[in-house]
Image: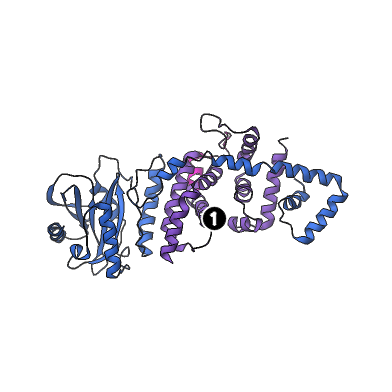
Amino acid sequence: MTDDDAELVALIDNELDESRRTALLARLAADERLRQRYDELREAGAPIAASLDALLEQAPLARLRAMLPAEGPVRQPSGRLTRIALRELAAGIVIGLLAAGAAAWVALSFGLLNEREDWRTAVVQYMALYTNESFASLNPDPSLQALELKALSGQVGVELTPDKVALPGLRFTTAFILSYDGSPLGEIAYVDATGAPVLFCIIANGAANAPTRTEKRREFSLADWSRGGHGFLVIGRKPREQITEWAQTLEKRI
Amino acid sequence: MSEASRREVRAGLEPSLARLWRYALVLSRARDVADDLVQATCLRAIERADQFVPGTRVDRWLLAILRSIWLNEIRSRKIREGGGFVDPEDVLTTDGAREIEMNITASAVLRAIDRLPEAQRETVLLVYAEGYSYAEAAAALTVPIGTIMSRLATARAALAKLK
């Protein structure tokens, strides 16, 4: 490449300002070798746009479309790197969304576990990502709360209203949708007075009816039950009795 | 503004998929990485939708996000995994196993682009395929306009040698 090449290319691409253009055109008029170089560079680059457009035709559109986050549940992403990528992004995405106060509907597919693990384990895993700052700043007005719950109802197929999900000692902060293994997984996030999060999760997984049972996993207490093809779960860093009380309140209402 | 931002970002994703994939492939030179890069871009775009200014070019905004994820997150992992960078094989014209059918010139040009260093490859794509002006490309790649000019000139000179 000669020093002139850059100027010639800028002329070819019509990016030279008036004075430089005039000067270069004058040189070209007088210099045959320079004219040849101009032609070489021009011809070399002429097919570039069309060739790169040919690449567009190779795009695996069906697969890419399937990977788009949808308004509703999302299929499991394919590709061996994708699960890792999503896990690494997941903490950032979920906490980022919440920190922005966004009540956006995002369906995320958490391929955190293989199919043999159950959805409650997935909830425990990402519950561990939340801090007292994750939800505490969110303060939706009643109409926004009703809107979020209505949208979530539509996704999981369980009727939810602010009254139905209100719990003593807890403040509603946000409701959003994830998906686990292809089933819509709704999350309602509350905080207590210190900002500590408590989640009420609902999954439309066709599970058989089961009465409330409680357990402790890591530093969390969980209470879960199934009815009508849905699994329900309340989880938080709270004593088992408190979680169980909240779960029983919700179970009666829903 | 938030609602309009989110709507425009969502609406802009699907029409941009093929171009995002092309950019991802040119950057990463690996088809599986390109898929993941596109998906990560779409997720990040939705996450950051509130930052998008309605009425501005959502396609360029998406390309910028893709570049950022490539540079900050995926590129270094690929270096650690793959060791070297310029794989000898033709990524733009083969599908892992077989040659992709296209006209002879396109194939030769893509093979040549394939062999360019990443900075030139990327500049060629943004200016000649995506229609960025020199100034826009300089801003997108945070280099002086003179660097854009010399990268394009070097790329054209390399292609000129094909004759």
Q: Nearest the camera: B79 or A41? A: A41
Quadrant of the rendered image containing residue A153 = bottom left
Asked if residue B78 is among those painted magenta in the image, a careful observer would answer yes
Q: Name, please, the residue furthest toward the right.
A: A30
Q: Measured from the top left, where is residue B48 in percent x and y? A: 43, 59
Q: Quadrant of the C terminus of chain B?
A: top right
Seen at 44% across and 49% down, the residue is: B40
What amino acid does circle 1 point to?
Arg
In this view, which residue lies farthest toward the top? Answer: B98
Q: Position of residue A54 (x, y in %)?
A: 58, 39
A150 and B75: which is toward the camera: A150
Q: In the rendered picture, chain B carries what hue?
A: purple
Q: Is residue B110 left or right of residue B76?
A: right
Location of residue B95 in the rendering, given as x and y in whole percent from the top left corner: 52, 33
Please tell me which residue is depicted at 19% across the width and 68% down the height of the picture. Answer: A169
- Can residue B21 be seen from the camera position used here? yes
Which color scheme did the rendering employ for the protein? by chain
Q: Quadrant of the N terminus of chain B?
A: bottom left
Q: Is residue B85 visible?
A: no
In screen coordinates, is A98 left or right of B131? Answer: left
- Splitting the image into 4 quarters, where does residue B29 fall? top right
From the viewer's perspective, tell me whether residue B124 is left or right of residue B34: right
Secondary structure state at the residue bearing disc 1: helix
In the figure, what tint was chain A given?
blue
Query: Mark 1 — residue?
Result: B60
* As drawn, A104 above or below A143: above
**Residue A55 image point, x, y percent:** 56, 40
Give the camera-side residue of B11 and A170: B11
Kindly identify which chain the residue marked by label 1 belongs to: B
Q: Is residue A192 above or below residue B86?
A: below
Magenta stretch in the rendered image: B75-89
Q: How many marks?
A: 1
